[in-house]
């Protein structure tokens, strides 16, 4: 299918959806594009990483480290550093942040009602939501529900490949997120029964923000997921870089998920916990994804710079052909956001102007040869196995993206939304 027709097919299918439930995290993203002007804050800094960011030197040393090593990373910052940033730095842009917020706004731009829960809802935060976002209590726009809440503000330092700061050159396009961790972050919603008639699927995230009452909080999240499971409402869990304490509580949730979304950093964090090794090659990444399936998920969506890779169990609700079309739609969506904002459905088409990754094509070809030796023949990006199926497509890579923060969230929201829209189209025809 020609890519333009594929996007049109997906956009048409979206009209079949009642809505989606999104929880738990939204925040305000302060965007800073890194260039030589930032050097005035970097006296005495070297490219090295600290376990915790306690002061501004830790912050900028970490930034240099991730630039030098070509990694994108999120690390929590202390309240002291957060206050220092607000006092000393001026963001170039302020926008919706947090997986639930970003995914909710993307669905809103696709004209899909997004029912959102988040612990903090200040006046400024409420104004950043898209027009089709509804607050979970009364299904009105968050602007009509804001409270005098504290704000969670993350600082996003974005840099392009080749950016030079203090004699450190950025290896790749990337971003470093200095994330605040406010006290009293709570998975406060305990019942979703009144929401369920208004939704077709749920996208859950934000587990990395928990810093106390772990057992109670994750028990609350687990009970919400299990209620959705029993109602037959598909659940996607979006992972993000977390400390070991959080990961030990996040990993058991995977067994209740229909789908799990993650990037290279998150894959390696989980694999190091359950297997003790780092996934470097595409073959190792694939083996790591299988280990996550073994934790109980029915499908894993892995987004990487050059390609997207999905592995599904036979009991997953979406078939391989539809998953491939969902991945291709996600590639166009993320590319469109990378070169400009997605504000309405037709904006996704602009992503087709961004070329497919040549490196991604090579990696998929390599995976194809490796799978062939194991009895799985891939044709047109789809490999059918005895116990699981493999789907891979190259990503669309903008050379100089305008923004990269949140692209993984848009990828996961796009994929899961498309899969559910295809499923809905089948039930409508039945």
Image (cartoon, grey):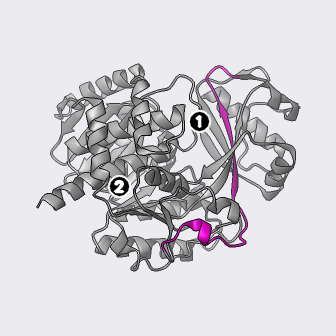
Secondary structure category for the residue under label 2: strand
Q: Main secondary structure of the magenta part?
A: loop
Q: Which residues are magenta?
A: 139-163
Residue at figure coordinates x 49%, y 56% from the top left: 104
Lateral position of residue 265 relative to residue 3, left or right: right
| Displayed quadrant of residue 351 | top left
Classify 328 as above or below 198: above
Quarter in which the C terminus is drawn: bottom left
Question: Does the rendering let one see residue 269?
Answer: yes
User: Is residue 144 magenta-colored?
Assistant: yes
Lateral position of residue 195 relative to residue 83, left or right: left
Secondary structure category for the residue under label 1: loop
Residue behind mark 1: 403
Q: CA distance from mark 2 to mark 1?
A: 26 Å
Residue behind mark 2: 259
- Provide residue 79's location: percent of width, then percent of height: 79, 58
The residue nearer to you, when weighing 73 against 426, is 426
Residue at figure coordinates x 50%, y 38% from the top left: 337
Quarter in which the N terminus is drawn: top left
- Packing grade of label 1 (10 A; few <14, some 14-19, many >=20) is many
């Amino acid at each position: 299918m020609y890519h333009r027709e594929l996007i049109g097919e997906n956009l048409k299918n979206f009209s079949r959806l009642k809505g989606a439930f999104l929880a738990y995290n939204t925040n305000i993203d302060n965007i800073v594009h890194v260039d030589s002007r930032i050097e005035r804050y970097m006296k005495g800094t070297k490219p090295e990483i600290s376990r915790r960011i306690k002061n501004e030197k830790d912050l900028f040393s970490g930034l240099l480290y991730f630039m030098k090593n070509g990694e994108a990373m999120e690390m929590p910052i202390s309240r002291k550093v957060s206050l220092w940033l607000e006092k000393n730095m001026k963001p170039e842009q302020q926008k919706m942040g947090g997986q639930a917020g970003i995914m909710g706004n993307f669905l809103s731009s696709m004209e899909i009602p997004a029912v959102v829960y988040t612990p903090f809802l200040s006046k400024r935060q409420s104004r950043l939501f898209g027009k089709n976002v509804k607050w979970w209590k009364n299904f009105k726009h968050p602007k009509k529900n804001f409270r005098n809440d504290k704000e969670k503000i993350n600082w996003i330092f974005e840099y392009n490949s080749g950016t030079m700061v203090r004699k450190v050159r950025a290896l790749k396009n990337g971003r470093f997120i200095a994330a605040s961790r406010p006290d009293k972050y709570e998975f406060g919603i305990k019942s979703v029964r009144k929401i369920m008639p208004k939704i077709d699927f749920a996208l859950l995230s934000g587990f990395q923000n928990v810093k106390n009452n772990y057992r109670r909080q994750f028990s609350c999240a687990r009970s919400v997921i299990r209620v959705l499971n029993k109602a037959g409402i598909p659940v996607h869990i979006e992972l993000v870089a977390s400390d070991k304490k959080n990961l030990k509580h996040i990993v058991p949730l995977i067994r209740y998920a229909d789908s799990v979304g993650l990037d290279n950093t998150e894959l390696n964090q989980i694999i190091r916990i359950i297997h003790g090794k780092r996934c470097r090659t595409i073959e190792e990444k694939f083996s790591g994804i299988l280990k996550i399936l073994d934790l109980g998920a029915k499908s894993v969506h892995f987004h990487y710079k050059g390609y997207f890779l999905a592995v599904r169990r036979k009991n997953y609700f979406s078939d391989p052909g539809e998953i491939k079309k969902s991945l291709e739609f996600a590639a166009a969506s993320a590319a469109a956001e990378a070169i400009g904002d997605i504000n309405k459905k037709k904006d996704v088409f602009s992503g087709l102007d961004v070329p497919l990754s040549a490196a991604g094509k090579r990696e998929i070809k390599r995976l194809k040869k490796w799978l062939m030796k194991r009895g799985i023949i891939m044709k047109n990006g789809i490999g059918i196995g005895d116990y699981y199926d493999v789907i891979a497509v190259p990503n669309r890579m903008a050379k100089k993206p305008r923004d990269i923060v949140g692209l993984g969230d848009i990828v996961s929201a796009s994929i899961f939304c498309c899969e559910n829209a295809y499923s809905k189209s089948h039930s409508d025809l039945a």
